[in-house]
Image (tube, grey):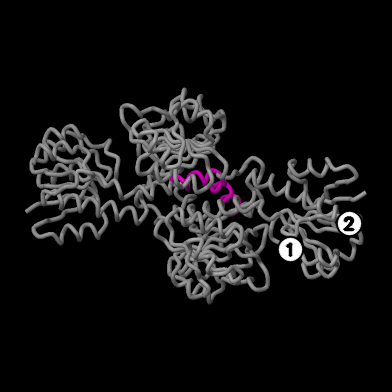
Amino acid sequence: MPHVLLERPLHPAGRAILDARAGVTVEVAADAGDFTARAAKADAILLWLGRVDAAFLDRCPNLKVVARYGVGYDTVDIAECTRRGLPVAVVNGANDVGVAEHTMGLLLAVARQIPAYDRMVKAGEWRSVDGPPIGELAGRTVLVIGYGRIGTRVARLCAAFGMRVMVHDPAFPTPRIAADGHIPAPDWKAALADADVVTLHCPLHEGTRHLIDADAFARMKTGVWLINTARGPVVDEAALVAALRSGKVAAAGLDVLTVEPAEKDNPLFGFDTVILSPHSAAAAQETLARMAVRAAHNILDALDGRIDPGFLVNPEVLRRNA
Amino acid sequence: MPHVLCLRPIHDDAIALLCASPGVTVEVLDPVTPETLAARIAEADAITVRLTRVDASVIARAPKLRIVARHGVGYDAVDVEALTARGIPLTVTPDANAVSVAEHALMLMLTIARQTIALHARTKAALWGFPADLPTFDLAGRTVLVIGFGRIGGRVARLCAAFGMTVLVRDPYVPRNTIIGAGFAPADDLEAALARADIVTLHCPATAETRGMVDEAFLKAAKPGVVLINTARGTLVDEPALAAALASGRVAAAGLDVFAVEPVEPGNVLLQAPNVVLLPHSAAATAESMRRMAMSCAESILACFAGRLDPQVVVNPEVLRRNA
């Protein structure tokens, strides 16, 4: 009787798929401590922001699959899972539309300084042409860092707005970027000098931690806009604060922070031109439902021994297990 | 010596362009009050107009006036008939602001879809997470009804399509085949289109025909939970009817850049309505658009002085034929 442990309640669209499977039992953890305790009996776990490391895995002898409700996997010790032959599944393809739209939403909100303008009108202050400076996307140059499922969509949307699109992704062949109609930027540090907007769409790993640091900011145009819907630690927040203070970065749209949930004294909250959302890029109703359905299928398929390697972070475990 | 009177400042590059033309003098009136205007209007061969009302009494006091250049595309604050009677062309800046306004409309859609304002305020207060009473949605897969398929509506339709939306277009003055050819579905039957659309966005001018178009009956015909975007003119909307529909939830949210009376009055019912994003008619106020509008005004004025005004930018082109 395979047992599935959910870190949190799952969207009904996904929960129904798990409940419909005969012989599978499902339970939801009450909190983090409860999750760790109950994981000892689980064949499959579904993670939101919970961390999985060697010590955690040592307590879970029955575990056959580690599934994430999301596409990031910086909270999971992948090497350790792989060493134990444990597949780590993510919901690839379920959230790219939503995150790409959220990116454009933040970019336009930054361009139009929407919270400040809305607040002024509601407070009776009418500044149609002499408010904080606002700008167009059309004609601006954007550097898209990371050309995966989300970055490709963002690049296409930026192009639709008439932006000049430069793309950097070391894992993606430059001729394909050019064939998609964008400008390849193999030397991303050089490209920073040319970008009016920088938007991040890479995973967080040791190679991308603090990718955008003081040196990167120094190379950027004065007045650049930074958008981050990837992972907080891809940006060195202290360096960003300094760049906002100096005016190097004019405005930023951030869905992710180094420390989440956000702490009250985060210095980024002191800038009017920084627009924030609570890691909600993938929180649209449609996206939540799609992610839940995919996560449920990933769990059942892994238990059935027939998971599509495309949904695994470490597909090499399938060959070894076979 | 033609004299250009700018009713409020315009972009420096445009002033420089006018000044560089031999014999042209430029004066910027700021602030524009009935008194300052009365004192200087008689000298003007050309005026640039931002938000000042140019009615028959203003025009009557400008004996030398040869052109009125609107810094923008709307001209409901200008008495066109009075100008036409005097043979004075009124120009607008049709190509200057379409990009900016179209982007603004998409921005309003995304701001509503992503609950940008409420979630920004919560995050700044260190309230993490997205509560169930602030649901967010994707534009992809939704249906949008674009009312008005001119320079702005056409761009909005294309941008919506880029987001994966189904795009319905309503414009009785554009042939069906033009809409179909552009890749969109013509909405011949407004009621049927309203019943289908998740988002309705307005991009038509305010005319006798369109004023008050979004009234109680319009909102009743709309799909429950519809989102309304207005970056066109406030007078297109019956504001109390919209406020009531927002209060009842019939309209889920509205993004409004324009109001029936601007600056918006403290008692405007929409200021207190739930789920509204309100902006101060700033859709075309980007740095790029402001410069393009100013340059377009300056070019029209110089072209008028040279007797070669492009009829495409003239609201009352009949005066050109008559003057010729």
Answer left or right for A43 relative to B30: right
Which residue lies most toward the top here?
A: B217
Count all numbered tags in the image, as a single digit: 2
Graded by Cα atoms within 10 Å as few (under 14), some (14 to 19) or many (20 or more), the crowding at tag 2 reads: some
Answer left or right for A284 relative to B17: right
Same subunit: marks 2 and 1: yes
Answer left or right for A108 relative to B234: right
Q: Which residue is mark 1?
A: A313
Residue at image position (61%, 61%) is A148
Q: Quadrant of the C terminus of chain B?
A: top left
First in residue order: circle 2 vs circle 1: 2
Graded by Cα atoms within 10 Å as few (under 14), some (14 to 19) or many (20 or more), the crowding at tag 1 reads: some
Residue at image position (38%, 52%) is A131
Q: Which residues are magenta?
A: B105-125
Residue at image position (44%, 64%) is A196
Residues at badges 2 and 1 in contact (C-beta under 8 Å)? no
Q: Amino acid at mark 1?
A: Val
The image shows residue B21, relative to residue A11, as above or below, that is below
Q: Amino acid at mark 2?
A: Ala
Q: Which residue is mark 2?
A: A37
Tell me which chain the residue with mark 2 is part of: A
- Residue A4 in magenta stretch: no
- Residue B109 in magenta stretch: yes
User: Foreground residue, A266 or A156?
Assistant: A156
